[in-house]
Amino acid sequence: MSNRSSFDDARTLRLDNAQELDQPQPGPSKIEIEEKSDRDPYQVDFDENDPANPQNWSNLRRWGLTVIAGILVLNATFASSAPSGIVTNILEEFHMEPIVATLMISLFVAGYCVGPLLWGPLSEEFGRRPLFIVSFAVYTCFQIGMALAKNTASLLVFRFIGGTFAAAPLTNSGALISDIWDARTRGKALAIFTVAPFAGPALGPTVAGFISVSGASWRWLFWVLTMFAGLCWITIILFVPETYKPILLVQKAKRLRKETGDDRYWAPMERTQKTLAQQVENILARPFKMLVLEPMLLSSTIYMSFIYGVLYLLFEAYPIIFTKGHGFNAGISGLMFLPIALGGVVAVILYLLIWNPRYERETARLGHAPPPEYRLHLTMFAAPLFSIACFWIGGASSPDVNYWAPLMAGGAMGFSISWLFLGFFNYIIDTYLMMAASALAANTVVRSAFGAAFPLFAGDMYEALNPHWASYLLGFVALAMVPLPFIFIKFGAKLRARSRFAPTKPVVPVEQTPTKESEKSEV
């Protein structure tokens, strides 16, 4: 059997739709045509234009599901940062140390380290819909627990468990979008979807801050989170169908067996048996094995994790800059986070106007998807801008400087973060294809660990170094990482050729014929 045949088998069984961002595909060989003709006629698959295939659903329905998927992520990320705007009220009631209050943010994000290792693989066993329903039901219950909590220990435990279940949309919402959009149409959906992970953390402190200055109890924040989560849970039950192809084919096979009385109809997933060792390998071992053995994945993960850590560090740094420095109350200080979200929105709009059409034109010119490094072109602008934004915040953090200066720096930071994440996420997916789920799981776990850790030392760092030098330090680290996308663009093809997990390879121009030497290097 050819490598292509084994690749197609894996794609059929796992169907991580990110795999469809393929490199140029040769026409079917005589052997492949014979294999297709010899295929078991009772093996169930979608017919052409089959209405049961999510990718054949109407644009209205698919865009509706895309918006819902984004709202589910917005819910989770909104909850992650919300306590930062009302932490003073919680400190007063429970007489806890400030570092313990910071743990309420860190432990929630730490739950993101555990969740992706569970919800992604489980959704591939049981489907997207059941995982959404169960995870949001439990998550909603723990928001009620937070609103009724009587001591510090219960607050911290409920936050960690709530974060673990809130991580479900962080993994499965993206998978749902990959289920319903094919590789050529997915770019716009993913770009719009990208706004949610950055808008949520920016909105959380704003809402919490105004609850604080209104004189309402801090518990009202968690009742708001409960209502938001409950509405999302009801929305899932009413409007989110199953979208995972292997599960849908199992349902179709069962329906055909029942309607025809013929038990010979079967779906590929029904004949795929995995041992416990294989399941543990797929869920736990493979992501970290890839992280250790893949320089591309390791370096991009470290860079993205640092960026994510800086984003969550701002939830401790901004109160120092704006509340202590400029004398703003909690509500107004919360508003200072909005430019970060607005910067992300502007970045997505420009991505849709500039980079996505550019990618589509290049695909049309080549006749196939460009190499993964093409996804990183926008990061050549975003990486320097992120470093500049860190220095900008540092230089503008003095009370003597008008508050509009750090506000604009926050907008630049949100803009650069969105472009960096759009570029690197697409790069990882395009590079690892059928292994993309494991690669993204490793990335999410490490990134979440940084997001959980950075707030823990942010307050002490900004107090010890002062806001100027603390932000400058972040800027210097970001500056040291600026060359990374340039290195990938120049040497990425060679790195992929040596990779043990990346099925993509340097693309041979259409007018050239690959030599035997080049064929030997192909996976």
Image: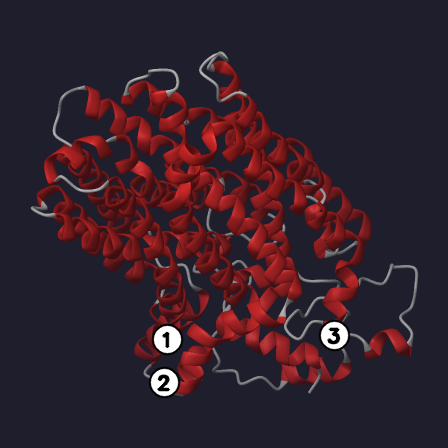
Q: Position of residue 3 (x, y in %)?
A: 69, 80
Instruction: Judge the density around disc 3: few (<14), some (14-19), many (≥20) Cα neighbours within 10 Å.
Output: few
From where the camera sits, is residue 284 visible?
yes
Q: Amino acid at mark 1?
A: Leu
Q: Which mark is residue 28?
A: 3
Q: Which mark is residue 256?
A: 1
Instruction: Report, in whole angstroms, how far the alpha carbon at label 3 lies from the one at label 2.
Output: 32 Å
Q: Amino acid at mark 2?
A: Asp
Instruction: Report, in whole angstroms, how far the alpha carbon at label 1 lies from the one at label 3.
Output: 30 Å
Instruction: Judge the density around disc 1: few (<14), some (14-19), many (≥20) Cα neighbours within 10 Å.
Output: some
Q: Quadrant of the N terminus?
A: bottom right
Q: In the drawing, does residue 470 fall left or right of residue 266?
A: right
The mark lying in front, picked from 1 and 3, is: 3
The residue to which callout 2 is attached is 262
The mark lying in front, picked from 3 and 2, is: 3
Which of the two discs, 3 and 2, labels the residue nearer the N terminus?
A: 3
From where the camera sits, is residue 137 visible?
no
Label 2 close to label 1 by CB (< 8 Å)? yes
Which of the two discs, 2 and 1, labels the residue nearer the N terminus?
A: 1
Quadrant position of residue 292: bottom right
Instruction: Report, in whole angstroms, how far the alpha carbon at label 2 lies from the one at label 1.
Output: 8 Å
Which residue is nearer to you in this view: 126 or 312? 312
Question: Which residue sits at x=90%, y=79%?
Answer: 516
Q: Amino acid at mark 3?
A: Pro
Q: Which mark is residue 39?
A: none
Question: Which residue sits at x=40%, y=57%?
Answer: 172
Helix, strand or loop at mark 1: helix
